[in-house]
Image (cartoon, rainbow, N blue to C red):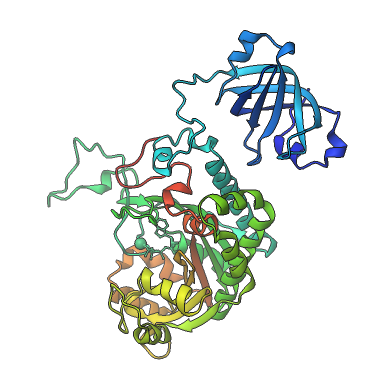
Amino acid sequence: MQRTKIKEILNSDPSIIIDKEYKVQGWVRTRRDSKNISFIALNDGSIINHLQIVVDHDKFDEVFLKKITTGSAIGVKGKILPSPAPKQPIELHADMIEIYGECPADEYPLQKKHHTLEFLREIAHLRPRTNTFGAIFRIRHNLSFGIHKFFNDKGFYYFHTPIITTSDCEGAGEMFRVTTLDLYNLPFTPEGKIDFTQDFFGKEASLTVSGQLEGELGALALGEIYTFGPTFRAENSNTTRHLAEFWMIEPEMAFYDLKDNMDLAEEFVKYLIKYLLDHNYEDLQFLNERYDKALLDRLNHVLDTPFERISYTDAVEILKNSKQNFEFPVYWGADLQSEHERYLVEKYYKKPVIIIDYPKEIKAFYMKSNDDGKTVRAMDVLVPRVGEIIGGSQREDDYDKLFKRIEESQVPIEDVWWYLETRKFGSAPHSGFGLGFERFMLFVTGMGNIRDVIPFPRSPKNIEF
Ligand code: ATP
Ligand code: MN
């Protein structure tokens, strides 16, 4: 008999499946015994809810039944019947049970009691079996799928940018080196420097911090592209918002100005929220109940509200005039800190905010200059609770201006000559942005720590599993 997923059974109209035979396979979450009957809550990962299995002791061997404990993997065949319990409309009455893997109760770390998220991080190999992480990883899947669907439906092409690279796009110098040199026997040049001409690529190579520069090359040929891939930053910041390995989505669009870019970002954020409300409602409800009572209200509010759009200069004025005591000082030219962003979003406007036209000194070399000579066409999208979720800009498309900014920013021209060359051969206005996938996961799940929205987090001194 073919296996049926528990999601399919629980989402069916009971009147259609009652009295029919099904086979299910999954892991035992709990087992409760009364005199002649046992109740097993079975979960197979397809949905947050469990299927209640009713086991009549007369039908099975007693020693065999003893082996079915919390955590064991079993298959059950039987008939669906109406359930007398108010919690669920149906239950499955077992006629046949197979045990695939027993689970020693005295050793299994996931007992019925509540476990802290910190403890669950130490057992990342087992935490997907909890309700919380089942919900989070199903949301993660649907969010990925929704991202691809959004862009595909709009005619964007999924463009694969390299993971091993020589360019430090953000210029922050936080790259992981990639080498095949023998670290115990390094080759040196006569000047005493490491001789990278003998390395695998004949040059210093690293893991990418962003696919943007290569993404722009795609946009200047295919029109509208997006990347969605792993990104690596060797920043030694042990915060709840930074990972050493995270995923990023970077759309790049030819013939888009900053306004088009903002419109796309706002539509994208709203589309994804709607997509999750449509596809993961039970999971979101669970997280709302368990971790963040304001989650669903917040998501619905963001979905229904036009984002506020203001200039950096106006944002600084608002912050300067506020009565709030900020830890970091506010003045024109200062980078906005998380506390400033959250004040604007949560206290002042009470809705998502897009800030544009930042001072060029605090933004990257590739952003298009405004006519004032002081600001660039940057945009940051800020949302409640998380702050900045998207960073983007219209890109500098003028050869001379870009050349000047590369020099000013001290980016070695031999690293980006190919990028600059696209401004010589058929340059076009274009824009794009980057969305940190795990930051967005924090926003849509209400979780507080970025290590809890990715299956196997990588952060300083943390690479188990
Ligand atoms: P932050 O100031 O928060 O470190 P950033 O300015 O370094 O961010 P960008 O270089 O603009 O960020 O990267 C684009 C997006 O990638 C950010 O908006 C954020 O969502 C995400 N991001 C950046 N660094 C990390 C990280 N270490 N872990 C997870 N996501 C990150
Ligand atoms: Mn950073």
Taking depth in this image into account, of 102 and 144 the one nearest to the observer is 102
Q: Image height check: is 376 above or below 223? A: below
Q: Locate residue 329, reporting x and y percent.
A: 28, 78
Closest to the observer, 43 or 334: 43
Q: What residue do we see at 46% from left, 65% from top? A: 385
Quadrant position of the C terminus in the picture: top left
Quadrant housing the N terminus: top right
Residue 221 seen from this side: yes
Can residue 394 be spotted in the picture?
A: no
Residue at horizontal 59%, vertical 52%? Answer: 144
Q: Is residue 131 left or right of residue 411?
A: right
Quarter-of-image position of residue 92 = top right
The part of the image, by quadrant, that contains residue 56 is top right
Ligand 2, image quadrant it occupies: bottom left
Query: Outermost residue, front direction?
Result: 35
State whether residue 335 is above or below residue 276: below
